[in-house]
Amino acid sequence: MSSTSIGNLVFSGGLSSNGNGGLGTGINVAQIVQESMATQNAELTAMQGQQTQISTEQTALNSLNTDLQALQTATQALTDPVSDLDSMAVQSSQPTVLTATALNGSATAAHSITVTNLATTSSDYTDPVATATTVFGNGTLTIQVGPDPTTAKTITINAANNNDTVNTLAQAINNTPNIGVTASVITDANGARLAIVSNTTGAPGNLTITSTPAAGSTTTPALPGIHTAVAGVNAILTIDGIPIASTTNTVSNAIQGVTLNLLAPSTSPVTLSVGADTTSAATAIGNFVTAYNQVVTDFNNQFALNASTGQQGPLAADSTIALAQSQILAAASFSTTGNGAINSLGDLGLTTNDDGTLSINSGALATALQGNFSSVQSFFSSLASRSFGANLTNQLNAITDPVNGSIAQDLNGLAQTQTGLTQQISDFQIQLTATQQQLTVQYNQVNVTLQELPLLLSQVNQQLSSLG
């Protein structure tokens, strides 16, 4: 086999004029350029594959970090000084008489409460007139809220002020600054009446309203008379034998941390029990287990072989993830001493499965919460120097801290690698384009030369024949 060279380009197999891609027929420039650049294109593909792999790792890391943050939130609900383990439940023996709520950390106690009467809101009304637009006589209306007469407001009623109907008078009252009442119009079979309701409950909101016709007024009907519908009185109750008065039916200062909601007078004492909210605590622990199991499953999925692909997850080779997995699993097995009956998750009825996830024995958990609630609180409390809660919080902070956490550092490293690789690919693509253009020009020149060779050979042959 022979070879023919043109410049620096070498073609094996020689050149011919038989129409099979040799002399006179030219070459497939695009194919030859593509084959010449095959190695460089393979290198580009490899870099793009690496870029895709990094993106996959970043997505997996962000997903894992989201689940770790959810675990951190569920842990905080158990470990913070004001947490679900500090929430209090309040039970009333007569919920139709009173209910109550308690702040976290309120004292556990039972109280005997008798409600004598509820606080009322003072209200007055006028005599009826024919309609809401019936004009009544001129005069004045004086409204006093509470016992202090200096707070009274006087409204002059006449046509000039456009307030001589119940409709317009109600508007005038509501437009008066700091008057302390709300006026409305009530219409029934008897006609239209002006209703005035105090904005303050209890005795401090009791209304004193007087109406006085103007001297010499001849307009009929006369200014409607005022009547008391309800007098404003304070709520009266006794708590553990101590008399209490309240201007509202929401009593928030009689028992520290407890707010009473008075609903009706009582015919017998109401027993109000304030204690730990074991239901909320069990829910919070269940939420923690759910979040923990999700994180453990995430880790397991990275290191398990995929049955269809035969490959592990994208983070299987990431040492940061392997370390984080060991930290989380070790935190779950943490135990303390000197904390009463609760020194490990097992004492709460939480057991570890073969895959590292946790299971809850609801009965055992209920028993632990009902019989050893203070020990459960201290077991999870992040304020204790050596507790499950403090240890887990420290481990999670080391992993999830947005600046110095191991996940954040890992993501930063991948981002830097991705940025550098993106620039490298961009530069390489520019180089490939230039190379492709150069090769195309060269092979186009070769193609032209090959197509002209038959004519040149014919001319040479003619010259040789003439010499013979």
Image (spheres, rainbow, N blue to C red):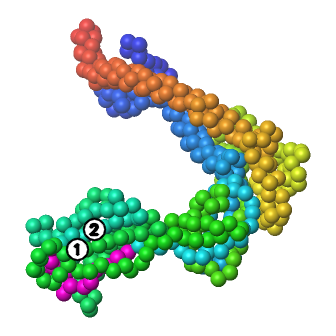
Q: Secondary structure at mark 1?
A: strand
Magenta stretch: helix, strand or loop mostly: loop
- Which contiguous range is marked in magenta? 123-138
Q: Residue at x 25, y 74 (%)?
A: 211
Residue type at tag 2: Thr
* Label 2: how many Cα within 10 Å (few below 14, some 14–19, many 20+): some
**C-alpha span from label 2 to label 1:** 9 Å
195 or 440, nearer to the observer: 195
Quadrant of the snapshot with the C terminus:
top left
Q: How many marks?
A: 2
Q: Position of residue 287 (x, y in %)?
A: 67, 57
State the residue position of label 2: 142
Q: Is residue 53 left or right of residue 429?
A: right
Q: Secondary structure at mark 2?
A: strand
Q: Position of residue 215 (x, y in %)?
A: 14, 73
Residue furthest to the top? 467
Q: Residue at x 56, y 76 (%)?
A: 117
**What is the quadrant of residue 85 in the picture?**
bottom right
Q: Given this view, does label 2 or label 1 mark the residue nearer the observer?
A: 1
Q: Is residue 452 left or right of residue 346?
A: left
Q: Position of residue 239 (x, y in %)?
A: 67, 68
State the residue position of label 1: 212
Residue type at tag 1: Thr
Evaluate if marks 2 and 1 touch, with contact meaning CB atoms under 8 Å apart. Answer: yes
- Residue 131, magenta (yes or no): yes
Q: Residue at x 61, y 71 (%)?
A: 237
355 or 426, nearer to the observer: 355
- Residue 213, magenta (yes or no): no
Q: Residue at x 54, y 74 (%)?
A: 118
* Label 1: how many Cα within 10 Å (few below 14, some 14–19, many 20+): some
Q: Position of residue 167 (x, y in %)?
A: 20, 75
